[in-house]
Image: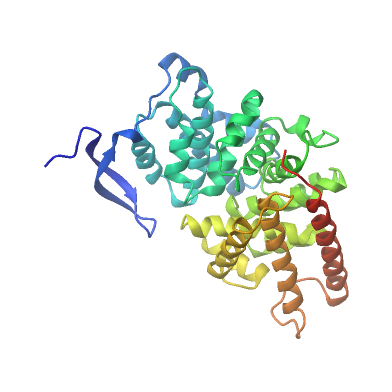
Amino acid sequence: MGYGRDNKVNDMLTTNPAGKMERTTMLEDQTDQLRPPPSVIRKILTLDPRRVEFRIRGFDLAEKSHEERLESIGKTFLRGYNLILSARSLAEFEQAMAQEPALLRGFFIEGGAMGSALVDSLPFRRPMLGKFRARFEKRYPLLVHAGTGLAMSKLSWREKAIVGALDPFYRWLAYDGMGYHNVYFQQEKTLNSPKRILAGYASQAYDQGVGRGIWFVSGADIGKAAALVDGMAADRRADIWSGIGLATCYAGPADENIFLEGYRRAGKHGEWFAQGIAFACSARMNDQSMPETISEAIKTLWGMEPEALAALVEELRQSNADGPRADHPRYEAWRHSVADAFVHSITERTRGDGEGIFFPQEEEQESVSQSAGEESSERHGAVGQTRLP
């Protein structure tokens, strides 16, 4: 039986549609092969897993379970990053990913995306990021694109090349990844900066990543996270709360009480906190790794099953991705559509007797809903004036 010289039989562990590992004999396309950098370069680029430990990073001390979760995320990320530097095929990388807990595989992918973008910056290299995207972005679109931004933080001179190699719709997540990286590894410098470091919509996407980073450096403490946001410029807070919402849901650990407290602390930016949660919900449903506690928290905050919310997010993505080109990023239009859906959801759920709704009391809720509507209108107007760089 001839497979042709560009293919070989490979016996490997893969994940089935239910997220379980299974051994599969598959035909491996030789075009899927990778050429790692020389060993001396790999040694320089490899990152020590201890870099993500709280005692090394100087993050706020957290509850032990929170600290363990966040450190495990960081170490999983670095395993993905370090492996892509030495892997000789994407099949090898995927086999290693399949051995990670389902809850952490997205972070393994994020690390691999960072490593792929970094390897592409080396001279005389075969492009790796394009192959990596083709293999993983359908299931992990947010993580693949955000991961490239972590590399971009170290390779500012490669910004145009990296962003240009990404999906035009999701490319803004590279700036999200940059913001996350800068908070995580340069906390004091980033959080004490008086204003954004980028221009145009890239600065908003950057702040969404800042929000994700704040969730980690605060030790997954919503009160500490909110205090850090309060110290930021007012015009940055909506995007930062969006990032916190995404990290609260995707990274965790969290439950319905944390979701509700986050919504309360976000105040007039509450719909952006909820929008971030919705994006994370969609990501978790897409990669089939939704924890039960997060599922229940989503039902409490959004008033719908995670499956329904993920379907809504995807429907709104398609309506914005396939629509006519506007003078603002379609990605931001998508975010607005999801935030507006949350405001509509609150309005519908508070029209009745409010039974089962755990939002603020009627008078306070009216004020929050009104300010949310005003905020949404203001942001829509701002978006209409934003042009792609």
Residue at 63% x, 26% y is 154
Residue at 49% x, 31% y is 116
The image's colouring method is rainbow
Q: Residue furthest bottom?
A: 353
Q: Residue 376's image quarter?
A: bottom right
Q: How many numbered discs, if any?
A: 0
Left or right placement of residue 277 versus residue 199 in this view: left
Closer to us: 257 or 333: 333
In the rendered image, residue 199, in percent from the top left (x then y), is placed at 78, 37
Q: Residue 16's image quarter?
A: bottom left
In the rendered image, residue 286, in percent from the top left (x then y), is placed at 49, 57
> Which quadrant, please, contains the N terminus?
top left
Whether residue 16 appears in this view of the structure is: yes
In the rendered image, residue 138, in percent from the top left (x then y), is placed at 47, 50
Q: Residue 12's image quarter?
A: top left
Above or below, comparing residue 87 to residue 68 in the picture: above
Closer to us: 384 or 256: 384
Residue at 69% x, 40% y is 217
Closer to us: 240 or 316: 316
In the rendered image, residue 379, in percent from the top left (x then y), is placed at 81, 55
Whether residue 56 appears in this view of the structure is: no
> Which quadrant, please, contains the C terminus?
top right
Left or right placement of residue 379 versus residue 110 in this view: right
Closer to us: 224 or 229: 229
Q: Residue furthest left?
A: 1
Q: Residue furthest top?
A: 40
